Amino acid sequence: MAFSGHSHYAFDVNSYYPGIVKYEWTNENKRVNLVHVPSLAIPRDKDHQTIHSGEPDQQPSQCYIVEVYDDYVSVKGMELNLTQSPSGEFLEDYAYDIPIEDAPTPTAANYVSSNLIAMWDGIENAGFGVHDGSAATWKNLAS
């Protein structure tokens, strides 16, 4: 699963461009779910125009609440405005339960590294498969 974006597109743009909010890509028996990151500020409509409500403190905003379980990830869209915190009311059209399939745990060694000049990893900061919680500097894994 990959969270990507930041295009500022509002959730409902998906009705004009199916797959822009959540897209499942499959190739050679491998599946990846791509989930668009919504806009907390300045969402845009299908014509790429900023959505305004008129009142500065009531500007639209969107977010996801993400919950990770042993066998799936729950992604639930919410509408907000700048003066609210999540209300607990989810947008049913933008709520997804994405199964977690058996897959190897990603490590820095699995990353595409051809032509990289530099590569630092917060978990494997002292070398491939090695973490140092007190490291003052991180190892460049591309060298």
Image: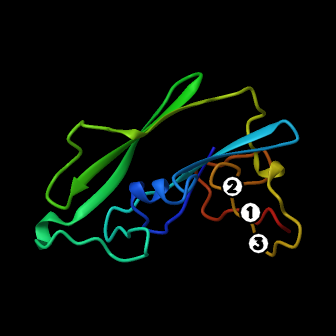
Please name whichever residue, 44 or 56, is drawn nearer the observer in this view of the structure: 44
How crowded is the residue under tag 1: few (<14 C-alpha within 10 Å), some, or many (20+)? some
Q: Are marks 2 and 1 in contact (CB under 8 Å)?
A: yes
Please name whichever residue, 135 or 47, is drawn nearer the observer in this view of the structure: 47
Res. 111 image quadrant? bottom right
Amino acid type of the residue tagged 3 in the rendering: Ala
Q: Position of residue 110 (x, y in %)?
A: 82, 49
Q: Are marks 1 and 3 in contact (CB under 8 Å)?
A: no
How was the colour assigned to the protein in this rendering? rainbow
How crowded is the residue under tag 2: few (<14 C-alpha within 10 Å), some, or many (20+)? many
Please give the label number shown on residue 118: 3
The residue tagged with tag 2: helix, strand or loop?
loop
For the C terminus, give its image quadrant.
bottom right
Q: Is residue 96 left or right of residue 39?
A: right
Please give the label number shown on residue 125: 2
Number of labels in the image equals 3
Which residue is disc 1 drawn over?
A: 139
